[in-house]
Amino acid sequence: MILNDVAPVWIRICLILVLVSGGFLLSSRSLKNLVRTYQFQSFLLVLIALGLVVLEEHTILLLVAALTVVSKVWGIPACIRLIQERIHIQQDLKFSYLRPPGALMLSILIILLVYITFAQILEKLYAASSLFFLGSVIGVSLVLMGLLAVCIRRMAISKVIGYLSMENGVLAFGLFVTELPFFIEFVIVIDLIILVLLTSIMTVGIDSSIEEYKSRLEEFHLLSEEGGIA
Amino acid sequence: MIAVLYPVVAMVILLLQLLLRTHRSLSLLGVIHPVISLIITLYFIVSPGIWDDSPFFLIDHMSLFVMLTTSIIFAAAALYAVGYIDGLVRSGDLEKRSLRIFYFGFSFLLAATTMAIFTPNIALFWICAELTTVLSAVLIAILALRATIDASLKYIFICSTSMLFSFIGIIFLFEAVRNKTGVGSLLWTEIVDEAAGLDSGMVFIAFVFFFIGFAAKSGIVPFHTWLPLAHAKAPSAVSAVLSGAILNIGMYGILRMTGIMKETGVFGQVSVLLIVFAMITISVACLSMLRQKKLKTLIAFSSIENMGFILLGIGIGSPVALFWALFHMLSHSCIKAGLFFSAGILHRQYKVPTRTGEDEIGDLLLLQPFAAVTVMAGCAALIGMPLFPLFLSKVGILLAAAAISVWIPAIVLLLFACAGVALLRFYLPVMAVRFPAGEGPVPYTAPLSMKVPIVLLLLLSIMIGTVMIPGEEAFLAAAVADLGFGVQL
Amino acid sequence: MIGESFIFALLNVAFVLVISPFFMMVIKKVKARVQGRQGPHLLQGYYNLAKLFRKETLYSEYAGCISRIAPYAALSILLVAAIMVPLFWIPEQELVTANIIVFLYLLVAGRLLIALLGLDAASTFGGMGSSREMSLSAIIEPVTVVVFAALVYVTGSFSIHDIFRTATTIFPAYNPTVLLLSVPLFILIIVETGRVPVDNPETHLELTMVHEGMLLDTSGRNLALFELSHAVKQTLLMAILLNIIVPAGIALELSVGALILGGVLFLLKGTVLCVIIGLFESAYAKMRFFQIPNLFMIAFFFSILTIFIEVML
Amino acid sequence: MSEIFLFIVLLYALSGVIPLCIRKKRIWSVSSIIMGGGGILLTLFSLPCLLVSSAKTILFQGEWVTFPICIGIDRLSALFCILLGMLSLAVALYTPGYLDRMHGNRRRYVVSGFIPLFLLSMLLVILAGTTIAFLVFWELMAILSFFLVLTEFEEEKTRYASLFYLAMTQISTVFVFLGILLMCVSTGSWEYPSHLSGSDPLISLSFLCLFFGIAIKSGVIPFHKWLPHAHPAAPSPVSALMSGMMISTALYALLRVVTGFYAPNAAWGFLILAFGCLSAVLGVMYALKEQDIKGLLAYSSIDNTGIILIGTGLWVLFTVFGSPALALMAIAGAVFHAISHGLFKGLLFLTAGSVCQAAGTRNIDEMGGILVRMPWTGGLFFIGVLSIVSIPPFSGFIGEFLIIMSLIGGLSELSPLLQIVMVVVLSLFSLTGALTVTTFVKAVGLTFLALPRSEGAYHAREVPWPMYAGPAVLALMSAGLGIFSGQIFSFLGYPGLLPDLLVLFLLLLGTSVLVYVAVWSYASRKTRITRTWDCGMRAPSSKMEYTGSGFTEPVVRFFAPVYRTRICVTREYLDEHQCLFRTGTGSIHLMKFFEECLYLPAARRIDRYASLVAALQNGDIDRFVLYVFCTVILLILILGWSA
């Protein structure tokens, strides 16, 4: 029974931590740390799922937690590490449009914006303290922060991590809609496929961000535009 | 249970494609699959009595209509691919081992598209739509050139990130339904039934988020950025499918969602939102067209323009406008696919890469009279000349728009004029370029299988542009009614 | 009635043909007198024509059929125009329409033929003449039309016959508009007949000639025809001015006495006008070609003024 | 009735399809015979409609996809149908010969196939009975003529012309389309409305849209600029059709719209009148300066459009201010002039086309002496000129005459303000007439008379007989229409509008004969052909003749404000300090005011916006994601704001 009282607090703490990890994803410059943060974020989602199991007794959430552990805490990070080793890059120092401090400020604004917006729309239906409301705010904020990461990070590999974190945001939101998770898992599987595809394409020769890779090719006169009418 | 044939056929074809080895058999399977789909679809269309027999499929006028468009385009593209891919392989552009990936991907793409159209579940629909992104990305990158991989990566990044928002939208919708009835639902039909009393705030959030993803899928500005790259870099058979079928999936999603919105209290806002996006899309696309130097990029921008126009029809939301929006969808697919096919022939003729990256077309009427004429006809069709169907939908949608505001048709027409000028401004100088004697490329003779689909599609579009096929009007009207937009025309 | 019209046409045309050379000579005589010369005999015009008709006709070897046709056509057009403008007798019925617009356009037709003739012989002077002639006519045309429009407006009729008939009923002194109209009409005569200050019919100087430039390559009977048509045109325009300002004496019905009276009076009036024209010519120097529009503007101003005055009164 | 009509349509369609499908040598002769037959049949078919009935006869009614299509003929459309029939006949006679001498193989089939289709589209525009049908055929007409202009696409000038044409056509379409949409919105049907009036702004707006759309198509200044580019660029039979028929079709549309669709409104009358005056005066002024003979004719079409517009505008004003007699006169003048302009402009373009083909140039300054070499063609051209400069018994005179009469008549019937307008219009109108004469003296004189000024002109030979038989039909029509105009008008039920020009014509003929006989019998018959006046030169050459620019120089000086010139100088120096002058060029260009100050700047501005917009697509994925990001944030803001 204590668990029942602890669980909401537990979930809240985890949600806040998810946001913090999102911020970290925006600002970290070491690729290794990025992957670790992502791992940590996914782990937090597992914890949230467990908390929800206690609270709402949906056993299917256990399945979700297990799948998350397998894919996100272990599988994908391992895969990314593999690629990282191949391309011999440890640091991601290049940003476009915004430097990390600015991005962090912006993400605070984003959270505020999402909070205010959702509060206005959802206040009639949910108490401000309801988990669904919190989940939606934090989930959408995380998605937006992930998008911001995709936008400002120039290396493709960091972009991928940004994308993955967006997905975590969707999952975080989805966890609170108790009947959905089964589909959410499907989503993950699909996006895993995308990821595999992405990485396999990228290993064709990518070792830096997409735009740079083009210019580098040009530098070595390797670029053979297929030209023609296209 | 005839609908089960779709997945069954797909399975069989996919399996066979894994097993069979020869190029010929692969391409044959590639043609058979869409043709069978087309036949099944036609069978469904003529026998409305059996629609309800298939429990796991959402079969109504709307989905059948989109499926019809899709299978026509796929069938034409598969036929075209027979000659086209063969040429690519012979010239060494496409590696032999990629062949299987191509055909497998192609059939799988059709299967995914079919499932997306017929699934009754929104989340499944979303997943299938995502699958089509992945599969078409594979097809875009099939030539394994840097530029194509680059384009395909951008496609995936933009589409997938945007599609995640759609999923948030779906979750909101689910929650909204649950809020009303206590039990959440993801079935299109059930949501439409429950739509009337849903909380307007929630529903609007759901719509906006849902729209983001599917707008990206159908190339609505500002989510369109992947489209000119992907469509231009892809092999022409794939470009045609992308423009003619995959973009429609995005529109299909928006259509169904707008149908749900019609029942709720927020349709006014939705309508404004859609019209604003449509106008932005048309403006950006038409103006961008003026500056394009490559044929396929130009055609790709024109796809954006037309998607914007369909969106305008949806945004207006009157039955007439929706009727013509659907009509526009079908006709645009046919014309655009034909145009990409013709561009493909030109591409095969003038594939010599140049340092400048500019097109180097010359002796057009001497070397490729067929392609030259069909490109011209396609351009005329895109400009919206009478006898071609786009003219009709232009009249229909703009008439509905004029009832809302005079400015909409005025601006749209001016922009269309820009687009028309852009097409010809590109094409006229190209027509007249002459190579110095003896320096021109070797004439490329397009095989019959590449020419037939072009002619067929052009004929088809002229047919739907000049006569109402018996039952067509009623069918389209019923499709509009399926969406929840009343029946009066 | 038709018979009467025929008689009128024959009489009028014959009269015009007969008196036109005379008027030309009167002007020449006046100018010569003013310059202190004796001047030609008053019948010299007839002698000239007779001489020219007897002479051999030369055609340029480059000239085409225009040179052959134009002289006859020009004269016939003016003769038809002459049927429209009654000099001394206004018949009951018009044989051919006397519409003032038709009359104007007939004059244009004559001008077109002469201008083409100037170009036909492939000589530089011809081209120059026709270029100048057409340019001048381009800017005088609005003036002409507005003058005649004012005339129509004042008299309320399009037919020249009716205009004249109305003119007999109003006494010009009481009608300032008619007097005002006489100024532009007079300028019109000056311009249309190529008089100083617009053109100088006496000289064949490259710098000044307009009308003569076009006729430089014609000779013999062709030249005679052109001289005659030029004279006829002048007489017709003079008749319009005269019969509006001083309509006195013009016969309104067919009787020998009235006709004779009308003819004699017209001869007198015409002579006086010719004297005035001669004096006017002598008083002015030839204008620079590009200054001529100023003169036209005066005419334009007066004709528009006429209309406005008529509106206001 | 409708069977005959369908048969005519079939004939036209057949003659269009035959050369497109069958690639046999000289197949265009067959196609032309069918087309000529169609033309004759069409004329015979429309004649009873013109003479007998004034009510509308429905020829065909049906649905095209979901839109109602109705085809019907009434008096106004019958009139234009006859014009179309006659032009078809003339062009059918003319085209095979022209195509035989044209270079390029495939395009000849295309041209001969598209001409009947183009004619058919115009026929259907004229007969259309619903706005949507009108729009459809209007568009078809535009696209077909575009392809015909494009015939000689290898030439830079032609491509420029056709692109210009396409752009203007598109804009015209925008307006017509919009006008028809608005009309449909305000009346709720696709039927031709009748005498719409009311304070609904939609109605005024739809009128303005239709007016501007049609004005662009008929070459009204300042929307004219495509016309002098496109008309000369097309092959001559096509130019003849474009200038003779397409403009007439547009004017038919204008007449239909102004007189039928809307109740007259004074403001619109002034608008039409203003555009008419502008077009008439500037059109002829540009024509005067043009050195390309087909360009000159094209500009003169603009001028004639202006005249017809003036007539139409006057009709509106007179109707509004209550002078029905004058209104009738003005509109009769406008309609008659539209028809006769179609005839004589077709004639002029066809004959000019023969000349251009024979001399191998379109530049007036390189021609000369053509009349001796091509007497038939030259003679027919001369008849066309007599008509266009409105010499009395010819048809061009009638329209101008009626309009001038109504203008002068208006002086005495209207209020002072309107009188001032009338005076201004009258003087501009007569200026136009006079300048037209000057223009065509230049065109005839420098092209046909005197010595040839180039090798091509020297070797020009008369064309085969069908190529002047075609124009001869038009010449006959054009003269006959004028001579019998009084009778025609009274037959149509408007007696007394016109003086009897038949008498005038007979008198002219009689007098000429009399004068000739008199001179022949009494004067000396001695004639010598010699060198008349050679300025002391031994061998006067064609270089001494007046050139086109020399001929028009005085007018250019008189109207200096209209003809703005620009002096271009280039210098080359031997050293880099630019001290030692090596060579250079100097040239004076006539400024193309509308092109340089209106169209090109506008196009450049659009292009600039376009490149700004196109720069959005810069290929950088970060930027692309940024768009998505910003849009999402924006949408969330909107969500919050709208809640």
Image: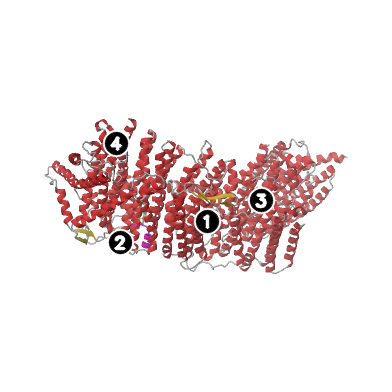
Is residue A155 among what the camera can see?
Answer: no
User: Mark 1–mark 3 contact, CB under 8 Å?
Assistant: no
Residue that mark 1 sits on: D3
Circle 1 crowding by C-alpha within 10 Å: few under 14, some 14–19, many from 20 = few
Quarter containing the N terminus of chain C: top left
- Residue indicated by mark 3: B474
- Helix, strand or loop at label 1? It is helix
- Of all chains, the one bearing label 2 is D
Dot 2 or dot 1, earlier in sequence: 1
The numbered mark at residue D372 is 2
Pointers 1 and 3 within a single chain: no
Q: Amino acid at mark 1?
A: Glu
- Using the image, tell me which numbered label, if any, was put on residue C302: 4
Residue range (magenta): D354-366
* Alpha carbon distance from label 1 to label 3: 32 Å
Alpha carbons under labels 4 and 3: distance apart:
74 Å
Q: Is residue D45 magenta?
A: no
Is residue D365 rendered magenta in the image?
yes
**Secondary element at tag 2:** helix
Badge 3: chain ID: B
Please name the amino acid that badge 4 sits on.
Answer: Phe
- Left or right: where C151 falls relative to D473: left
Report helix, strand or loop for mark 4.
helix
Question: CA separation, marks 4 and 2?
Answer: 46 Å
Tell me what residue is drawn at x 37 percent, y 33 percent. D416
- The chain letter for the residue carrying disc 4 is C
Chain letter of the residue beneath label 1 in the structure image:
D
Residue B262 in the image, given as x and y percentages of width and height: 69, 42
What type is the residue that disc 3 sits on?
A: Ala
Q: Which one is in front, D229 or B327?
A: B327
